[in-house]
Amino acid sequence: MSNYLIYGANGYTGELIARLAASRGHRPILAGRNAAEVGSLAATLGGVARVFGLDAIGTSLDGVSAVLNCAGPFARTAKLMATACLRAGAHYLDVTGEIVVFETLAAMDATAEKAGVMLMPGVGFDVVPTDCLAAHLKRRLPTATRLRLGFQIKGGVSRGTARTMSENLGSGGAVRKGGKIVKVPACWKTRRIDFGLGPTMAMTIPWGDVSTAWRTTGIPDIEVYLAAPISMRIFARLSRVLGPILGSGFVQRRIDRKIAGGPAGPSAAQRQRGASLVWGEALDDRGSRVMSRLRGPEGYTMTALTALAVVERVLAGEARPGFQTPARVYGADFILGVPGVERVDG
């Protein structure tokens, strides 16, 4: 498999995916802005390198049937690359978890359908496991009107994830009510959730499923929770009033320097020890409730596995034109094909 392109292949997540792809015999085109890093990785993996920025894509997607965008923050990159994919007739995938990206690309649905191109953001840990669990819960309770999803991560974060989190400091939270995305304060709600290791406190976050799960299930009221220690919950509440300061150029530059000075992401040993735990419940207006959990590999390992699983489906011809979500195209049980993933119904 060589007719797809990984953009941002020299980043932490992009390189994980590229190396996993090579181990499976894939030879994707590895692309990005840094010629030295992209070229070195391509030479190591026996692949082809293309060097270009998103402001000058030109003919860089010629001969490509699908693009996997791993260059975040995706609020800056997704629309540019997706637009180029529409021109080139290449299916667009990425590993975002940003609501604004899902909503932006969803607005391009009709154009993508006309072009015969699938736009499927969120093919990593953001949001394949949660999207599949949402579809499974809807299948178990077809009358559901409320959906609650949550996750607990055992492992660290990459520089790219940290930068995305930094840029969104002070921007508040979001939930879906009556089918509409509604802004709410950071840490709007807290609750105890047993993700599989015993009850722990969790808080609402503006995770991508606030956008995608509604398109997958049609359930109108959706909240997403993250297992969060008290320090994180306190900081989230403080961000309600400190938002303008946290978002200022001065503070963002200082945070960015600190992020740049840290590790690129979790080490191989940390990923091996880590795990991702996903929980969900669906409720209807008659008082019925169903609950399910997923347990799988650490988040970045999960992302590499799910992203490549989607790429392989797309290259096999399983792509539906227009804006799509993973579970809407590949079904609730798609996640069970990922090595190490288990699902339990409560």
Image (spheres, rainbow, N blue to C red):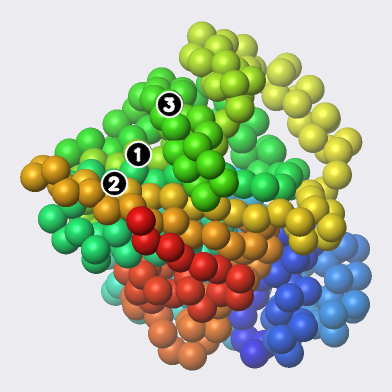
Question: What amino acid is at disc 3?
Answer: Thr
Q: Quick one: quadrant of the N terminus?
A: bottom right
Type of the residue with mark 2: Leu
**Residue 31 lies in what quarter of the image?**
bottom right
Label 2: which residue?
147
Q: What residue sits right under mark 1 in the picture?
A: 223
Please indicate, yes or no, whether residue 108 appears anywhere in the rendered image. Answer: no
Residue nearest the observer in this picture, 120 or 340 = 340
* Residue 238 % position (x, y): 55, 12
Label 1: state its secondary structure.
strand
Residue labelled with disc 3: 190
Say above or below: 5 vs 317: above
Up-down relation of residue 146 to residue 299 (above or below): above
**Would you call the spot at circle 3 few (<14 residues within 10 Å), some (14-19), or many (20 or more)?**
some
Residue at x 76%, y 82% (from the top left corner): 22
Inspect the image, locate mark 1, and give the three-letter code of the amino acid beneath it. Glu
| Disc 1 crowd, CA 10 A, few/some/many (<14, 14-19, 20+) | many
Horizontally, residue 107 falls left or right of residue 7, namely left
Disc on the earlier residue, 3 or 1? 3
Residue 227 lies, in percent from the top left, at 54, 36
Rendered location of residue 86, percent (x, y): 44, 70
Residue at mark 3 to residue at mark 1: CA–CA distance: 11 Å
Marks 1 and 2: CB-CB under 8 Å?
yes
The spot of residue 342 in percent (x, y) is: 51, 68
Distance (Cα) linking label 3 and label 2: 15 Å
**Residue extending farthest left:** 286
Q: Is residue 7 or residue 262 the one in the foreground?
A: 262
